[in-house]
Amino acid sequence: MSDEPRHSRKGDYRAARIGASFALVFVVVAILLVDAFDVNYEANPVVLAALCGTILTLLGIEVRSISGGNGS
C-alpha cells in the first residue's frame, strides 16, 4: 500500500493550521487598530487572549510536528 494519500493529507492539515494562524493574526491586528483609532471602541481583553491562545495552539502543533512529536 502506498502512503501517498496520507502524506498529502498531513501536508494539507499543516497548510490549514498555518493559514488559520496567519488569518487570526490579521484579525488581532485589525481589532487592535480599530481600538487605537476609534474612540468609541474598546477591545475586549478576553477576546484578544482567546484569539492569541488559539494562534499559539495552532502554531504549537506545528512546532511539535516539525520537531518529531506526535502532532498530526
Image: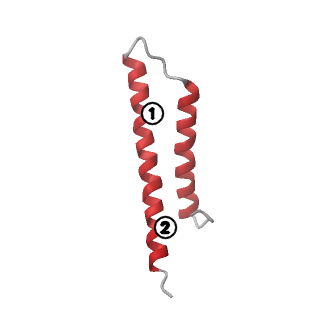
Using residue 33 as the reference point, say whether residue 14 is left or right of it. right
Residue 33: percent from left, percent from top: 38, 25
Residue at 43% x, 71% y: name it: 8
Q: Secondary structure at mark 2?
A: helix
Residue 55: percent from left, percent from top: 52, 44
**Furthest residue to the top?**
39
Disc nearer the start of the sequence (1/2): 2
**Furthest residue to the bottom?**
1
> Which image quadrant for residue 31?
top left
Residue 28: percent from left, percent from top: 45, 33
Please give the residue where the numbered disc 1 appears in the rendered image.
28
Using residue 50 as the reference point, say whether residue 38 is left or right of it. left
Numbered badge on residue 10: 2
Residue at 44% x, 79% y: name it: 4
Numbered badge on residue 16: none
Residue 61: percent from left, percent from top: 57, 56
9 vs 31: above or below: below
Q: Which residue type does callout 1 highlight?
A: Val
What colour scheme does the image use? Answer: secondary structure
Residue at 41% x, 43% y: name it: 23
- Number of numbered markers: 2
Q: Secondary structure at mark 1?
A: helix
Dot 1 and dot 2 residues touching (CB under 8 Å): no
Q: Which residue type does callout 2 highlight?
A: Lys
21 vs 35: above or below: below
1 vs 49: above or below: below
Graded by Cα atoms within 10 Å as few (under 14), some (14 to 19) or many (20 or more), the crowding at tag 2 reads: few
Name the one closer to the observer, 23 or 65. Answer: 23
**Furthest residue to the left?**
37
Task: Work out how far the residue at label 1 is from the one at label 2, CA to CA, in angstroms.
Answer: 27 Å
20 vs 12: above or below: above
